[in-house]
């Protein structure tokens, strides 16, 4: 189980989310919401995400906030051929991948054939084209998508847990044969 960030600030139970992720995830990235907490954005801004970061900061305590500072926003699981980032590969904390043009910029920087990203909290699959912008595939929850061999794929699992329930991406990695299944409960 891998967490791509944005897990301990913004929701009603920051401490519980922190503990669940730390106890159950093999890989944990820090996202912009974790950075809101560690940078104490609430000293500069008020309302919205700043208030959520303040609540999380108080709930998590000094040691957990210190641990958040150590989280990377990007990593490679080279043995699996997977690269992970909270946001884009150009700016793993702050930059969104919302369009084929955004995806193109990250695909140019990819070191692995499968790249997972979060930040937008929307399910998506971009596949590098031979030339030009990548193709975007429509996602049907529960359907298995074979990922093309020899073409880099950029995937977002979705929102994790939101107003429509929990979402996650199941990757099936068998050498070069790879597939992805988006789930929602």
Image: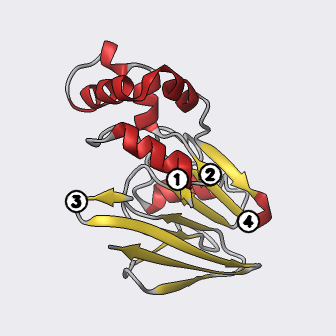
Name which residue lies at 54% across and 45% down: 22
Name which residue lies at 39% across and 78% down: 138
Do we see residue 37 in this rendering? yes
> Residue 98 is drawn in which quadrant?
bottom left
Q: Which residue is mark 2?
A: 27
Q: Residue 122: which numbered mark, if any?
A: none
Name which residue lies at 45% across and 41% down: 18
From the viewer's perspective, is the residue at label 4 or at label 3 nearer? Answer: 3
Q: Which is more N-terminal, label 3 or label 4?
A: 4
**Residue 113, percent from left and from top:** 69, 67
Image vertical order of residue 45 relative to residue 179, above or below: above
Q: Which residue is mark 4?
A: 81
Q: Secondary structure at mark 1?
A: strand
- How far apart are labels 2 and 1 at the CA level? 6 Å
CB atoms at circles 2 and 1 under 8 Å apart? Answer: yes
Q: Residue 163: which numbered mark, if any?
A: 3
Q: Which residue is mark 1?
A: 3
Q: Secondary structure at mark 3?
A: loop
Position of 108 with respect to 92 (left or right) is right
> Residue 131 is drawn in which quadrant?
bottom right
């Amino acid at each position: 189980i891998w967490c791509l960030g944005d897990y301990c600030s913004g929701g009603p139970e920051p401490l519980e989310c922190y503990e669940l992720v730390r106890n159950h995830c093999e890989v944990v990235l820090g996202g912009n919401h974790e950075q809101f907490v560690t940078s104490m954005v609430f000293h500069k801004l008020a309302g919205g995400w700043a208030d959520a970061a303040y609540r999380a900061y108080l709930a998590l305590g000094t040691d957990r906030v210190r641990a958040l500072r150590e989280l990377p926003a990007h990593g490679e699981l080279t043995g699996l051929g997977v690269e992970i980032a909270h946001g884009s590969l150009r700016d793993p904390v702050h930059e969104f991948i919302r369009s084929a043009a955004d995806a193109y910029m990250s695909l140019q920087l990819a070191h692995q054939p499968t790249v997972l990203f979060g930040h937008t909290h929307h399910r998506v699959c971009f596949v590098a084209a031979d030339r030009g912008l990548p193709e975007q595939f429509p996602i049907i929850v529960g359907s298995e998508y074979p990922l093309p061999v020899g073409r880099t794929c950029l995937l977002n699992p979705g929102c994790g847990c939101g107003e429509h329930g929990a979402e996650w991406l199941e990757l099936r990695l068998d050498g070069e044969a790879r597939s992805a299944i988006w789930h929602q409960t």
